[in-house]
Amino acid sequence: MSGQLGPIPGPEDDSKAKDIQGKKKPQRVSLMKLFAFADAYDCFLMFVGSIGACVHGASVPVFFVFFGKIINTIGMAYLYPAAASHRVAKVCNSENAHAK
């Protein structure tokens, strides 16, 4: 490495960049035109992906509740160590039963 940086952009470079950005405006298209070339397989994949995204998004609150119960049970182990392993197993088994 030579340790040299590229040229420092001056005010004339900024005006050129603004001119280029100002000339190109994105063209708006309708929703039907956007999916004009999508066939049945593409629509099926978009549907499956949307369902998967919803399931993935809903799983986060479920994990918060599940791990919250486990953390509360483990926190109680400090006060009642003899009952801790039984309660953790009970919480884990009850969550597994709900998942089936």
Image (tube, grey):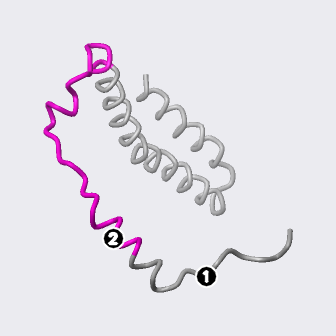
Q: According to the image, label 1 marks what residue?
A: 8
Report the amino acid beneath label 2: Asp
User: Percent x, y for residue 18?
Assistant: 35, 73
Q: Give the range drawn in magenta.
A: 16-44
Q: Against 43, is 67 above or below?
A: below
Quarter of the picture holding the N terminus = bottom right
Is residue 72 on the magenta stretch?
A: no
Q: How far apart are marks 1 and 2 (CA)?
A: 19 Å
Left or right, residue 9 beside residue 11: right
Q: Tell me: 46 left or right of 10.
A: left
Camera-nearest residue between 14 and 65: 14
User: Which quadrant of the view contains residue 51?
Assistant: top left
Q: Position of residue 91 (x, y in %)?
A: 52, 40
Q: What element carries label 1?
A: loop
Compared with 27, 21 (above or below) is: below
The amino acid at mark 1 is Ile
The residue to which callout 2 is attached is 19
Of the 4 image quadrants, the one containing the C terminus is top left
